[in-house]
């Protein structure tokens, strides 16, 4: 069993160093290289099997104890009636016993603090380190990435704090099951769904479509087209154009039949943009950019436009009885 | 004055206690900079070196980072809010009033929690779009995308269960509308709704269940999936930027 060819374990020469201090470095940077050849076994199965057994033994033993012995339960808590003696849980009874001999400040504060402190300082010893090599195309995570992460954290927290200072979270009257507000709205991120309820039967808007969306999202990386698709019009495109026209017409008629224009109209617009991308490789900047878009990207864009539109309509343009209103009408 | 301070810092950095906690010296060599990363439980999710271009803003727009930071803010403010909140009717609503008018900085605390929640949902959604348009879901990252979808759903449910807790009209009816949708699922819809609400209508039972889901079940689920998500980013070769970047070899690991 040999170590990885390019990495060697180097042991510190400092006799007082923590034994764990084994650094991984390039072989030629250090003279005193010694391979660790033995005394190792594979974590799996040797350790993992023992861990599983340990877990099972403990759980089974505990279950047996729980079957055999009931947890104590006395009368309901009563601030007036003090039991004699009143005892702390067992792991504090040592302290409580000390209280019997010493004044409370000694038994309750000084001695416990001393114990904790003594435990904490046990392992202290001298520790040492030295320096090493450099690189090219990569940068050191510290400081380059870590500094950016710290800045990101601070920017987000400060920005959020400012927003929280200037804008109060809404709080209406206490919940009243009798008095239904009109309109009764879900949180904003569900208003797209609630808007769908206006057009489709509940089973479609509340179950079928959301399930379809989640499923479609989940399978994206496994669908071959998402991995292989080039620009939509890369191969001539007569059949592509026909298929696109047919699907667009079908979708438009389907959603139009339900009166669901917030889906039907963006469907037409997206298809329009897709056709505009055809032959765009020789056009202006915008058309060149459009010409590079793949079919999966067009579909996702179509979905995002619709989801955004439905959410905006549900949030800002729906009033009493889910009728269309202007955001400034004050009836939302 | 300044000379004294520097030597004090040096003395502190050289002390046995400091060196037992932070084992490496000043990070002025690449060796020590490496040690900063792999000697630290939290930082060692990172490799010791990263590809330089991954640091560019347009590489990821830091959207996953923004989502993560808002979730940290939510955990911190959420724990503080738990000190003041009783999940019972009508005390829950009274606690809101107490937070708004009695508790020191209570209104700020609640505001921060609320707006951070909105930011988290929004940033998570944008993060998903970024990953999609950068085609960063491609092998070997397929499964991490799926975990991301799960995280998005958990995030939505976290936000949604928290929505009921103030027990005001907004909360009550928002949740009534939402759970009525769950009812429409065939066969199990009614049962799921009953299980979720602890009854047939939004009531005190629902408040308690949403509270437990919001404060324990969903955060634990979130942290578990989040750990796997971040772990796999590292294992799959680091963050994947725009598609022009795909010629990268898998290895992000520095020596």
Image (tube, rainbow, N blue to C red):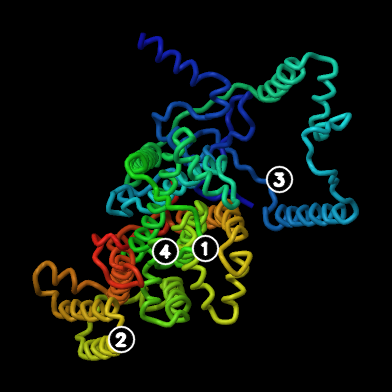
* Alpha-carbon span between mark 4 and mark 3: 72 Å
Q: Earlier in the sequence, mark 2 or mark 4?
A: 4
Q: Which mark is residue A177?
A: 1
Residue A122 lies left or right of residue B18; in this view the side is right
Choose top left, top right, bottom left or bottom right for residue A15. top right
Dot label at residue A271: none
Query: x%, y% of residue A2?
Result: 61, 50
Question: What is the residue that sits farthest to the front in this orientation?
Answer: A178
Mark 3 = which residue? A39
Which tag is nearer the camera, tag 2 or tag 1? 1
Image position, residue A128 (x, y; %): 54, 25
For the residues bearing labels 1 and 3, Cβ distance under 8 angstroms = no
Write down the quadrant of residue A93 in the picture: top right
Q: Are marks 2 and 4 on the same chain?
A: yes
Q: Which mark is residue A181?
A: 4
Q: Give x and y (percent) for residue A96.
A: 82, 25
Real-space CA distance between mark 1 and mark 3, rounded to the nearest whole angstrom: 69 Å
Q: Which residue lies at the image location 62% right of the left edge and 35% below the top edge?
A: A20
| Residue A258 in the figure: left or right of residue B237 | left
């Amino acid at each position: 069993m040999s170590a990885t060819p390019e990495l060697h374990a180097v042991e510190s020469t400092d006799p007082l160093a923590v034994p764990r201090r084994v650094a991984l470095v390039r072989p030629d940077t250090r003279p005193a290289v010694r391979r660790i050849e033995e005394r190792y076994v594979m974590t799996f199965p040797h350790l993992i099997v023992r861990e599983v057994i340990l877990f099972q033994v403990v759980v089974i033993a505990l279950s047996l104890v729980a079957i055999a012995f009931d947890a104590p339960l006395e009368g309901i808590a009563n601030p007036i009636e003090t039991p004699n003696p009143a005892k702390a849980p067992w792991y504090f009874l040592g302290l409580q016993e000390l209280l019997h001999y010493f004044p409370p400040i000694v038994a309750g504060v000084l001695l416990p603090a001393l114990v904790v402190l003594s435990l904490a300082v046990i392992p202290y010893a001298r520790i040492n380190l030295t320096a090493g090599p450099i690189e090219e195309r990569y940068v050191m995570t510290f400081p380059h990435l870590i500094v950016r992460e710290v800045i990101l954290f601070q920017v987000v927290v400060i920005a959020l704090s400012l927003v929280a200072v200037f804008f109060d979270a809404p709080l209406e009257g206490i919940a009243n099951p009798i008095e239904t507000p009109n309109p009764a709205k879900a949180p904003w991120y569900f208003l797209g769904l609630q808007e769908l309820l206006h057009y489709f039967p509940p089973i479609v808007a509340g179950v079928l479509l959301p399930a379809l969306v989640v499923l479609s999202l989940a399978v994206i990386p496994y669908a071959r087209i998402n991995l292989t698709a080039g620009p939509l019009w890369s191969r001539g495109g007569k059949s592509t154009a026909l298929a696109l026209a047919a699907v667009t017409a079908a979708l438009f008629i389907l959603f139009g039949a339900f009166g669901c224009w917030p889906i039907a109209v963006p469907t037409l617009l997206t298809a329009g943009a897709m056709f505009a991308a055809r032959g765009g490789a020789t056009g202006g900047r915008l058309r060149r950019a459009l010409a590079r878009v793949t079919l999966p990207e067009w579909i996702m864009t179509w979905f995002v436009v619709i989801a955004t539109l439905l959410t905006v309509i549900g949030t800002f343009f729906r009033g009493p009885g889910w009728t269309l209103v202007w955001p400034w009408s004050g009836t939302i | 004055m300044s000379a004294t301070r520097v030597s004090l810092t040096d003395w502190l950095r050289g002390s046995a206690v400091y060196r037992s906690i932070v084992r490496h010296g000043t990070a002025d060599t690449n060796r020590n900079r490496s040690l900063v990363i792999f000697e630290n439980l939290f930082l060692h999710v990172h490799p010791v070196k990263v590809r330089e271009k991954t640091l560019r803003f347009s590489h990821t727009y830091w959207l996953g980072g923004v989502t993560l930071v808002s979730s940290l803010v939510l955990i911190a403010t959420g724990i503080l809010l738990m000190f003041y909140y009783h999940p019972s009717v009508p005390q829950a609503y009274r606690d809101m009033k107490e937070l708004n008018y009695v508790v020191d900085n209570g209104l700020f605390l609640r505001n921060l929690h609320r707006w951070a929640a909105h930011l988290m949902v929004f940033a998570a959604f944008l993060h998903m779009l970024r990953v999609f348009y950068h085609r960063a879901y491609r092998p070997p990252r397929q499964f991490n995308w799926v975990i991301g979808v799960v995280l998005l759903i958990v995030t939505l449910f976290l936000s949604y269960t928290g929505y009921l807790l103030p027990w005001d009209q907004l909360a009550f009816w928002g949740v009534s509308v939402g759970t009525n949708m769950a009812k429409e699922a065939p066969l199990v819809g009614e049962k799921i709704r009953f299980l979720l609400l602890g009854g047939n209508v939004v009531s005190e039972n629902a408040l308690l269940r949403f509270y437990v889901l919001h404060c324990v079940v969903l955060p634990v689920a979130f942290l578990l999936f989040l750990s796997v998500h971040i772990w796999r980013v590292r294992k799959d070769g680091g963050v994947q930027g725009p598609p022009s970047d795909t010629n990268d070899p898998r290895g992000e690991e520095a020596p």
